[in-house]
Amino acid sequence: EAGVTQFPSHSVIEKGQTVTLRCDPISGHDNLYWYRRVMGKEIKFLLHFVKESKQDESGMPNNRFLAERTGGTYSTLKVQPAELEDSGVYFCASSQVLAGMSSSYNEQFFGPGTRLTVL
Amino acid sequence: QKEVEQNSGPLSVPEGAIASLNCTYSDRGSQSFFWYRQYSGKSPELIMFIYSNGDKEDGRFTAQLNKASQYVSLLIRDSQPSDSATYLCAVGKRNYGQNFVFGPGTRLSVLP
């Protein structure tokens, strides 16, 4: 079974440009999460989709970040315009919705991340 | 106070020894606890999860949870050089729409 995949693995852009990151979750996983790790800091939650719906976007830093998950399959995270402080590693994770169990018990499987560098 | 705290390390142990990794959390409503291992430049990989007070064993790994003390630990027995990595403690926060709160990670170095 294929794991969570992310594209691109690296992206270097200039301040003010736009970048779109893509995540393909494990097939059948309705939960999809975006996280970010900036240098020297811990991994921080950005937002959570259940299928195509945004369940929680409390971690999105500002309105320069836009996440979508049309059709409930893959997701994109767009940063427009990018700023220097957006540099970091963006991780995507997915998990199943387990019948009869609270989602708080869901194991999340992480993708390899996209390393974004804004110059 | 950070929501999830870990000693950043590095924690160095000799090969074959027991490595003990600790994590404390501030939210008493936390329900689920996960240990991830992350090699440099790679994705976090789930090692263990624990939901109930007590110990949970899986091979060389034992997770321990004490909700009263808001403390979770990971023991690695018979440590191997391949265990050298950063270990991330993640705490699940909500009943639904759960997201994880991560600690900063502890870097473990197992010396041959």
Image (cartoon, grey):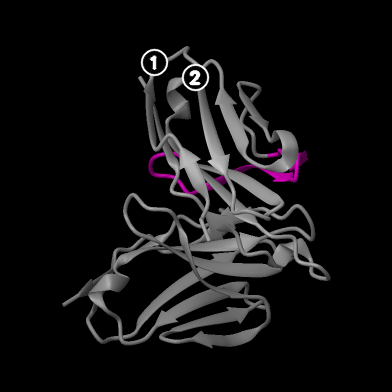
Q: Residue at x 67, y 42 (%)?
A: A73
Classify mark 2: helix, strand or loop.
loop
Residue A24 belongs to the span the image colors magenta: no
Q: Position of residue B84 (x, y in %)?
A: 29, 68
Q: Residue at x 43, y 15 (%)?
A: A15
What is the quadrant of the C terminus of chain A in the image? top left
Distance of mark 2 from mark 1, alpha carbons?
8 Å
Q: What residue is pinned by disc 1? A: A14
| Quarter where residue B54 is shown | bottom right
Is disc 2 surrounded by few (<14), some (14 to 19) or many (20+) residues within 10 Å?
many
- The kind of residue on which mark 1 rests is Glu
Q: Earlier in the sequence, mark 2 or mark 1?
A: 1
Q: Chain of mark 2?
A: A
Please, what secondary structure does the residue beneath circle 1 have?
Answer: loop
Q: Residue at x 37, y 53 (%)?
A: B42
Q: Position of residue A81 (x, y in %)?
A: 53, 15
In the rendered view, tell whether residue A92 sits above or below residue B84.
Answer: above
- Residue under circle 2? A82
Q: Chain of mark 1?
A: A
User: Is residue A90 among what the camera can see?
Assistant: no
Looking at the image, which residue sits at the far left? Answer: B112
- Of the residues shown, which amino acid type is indicated by label 2? Ala
Q: Is residue A66 above or below residue B40?
A: above
- Say if the magenta span includes residue A42: yes
Q: Quadrant of residue A80?
A: top right
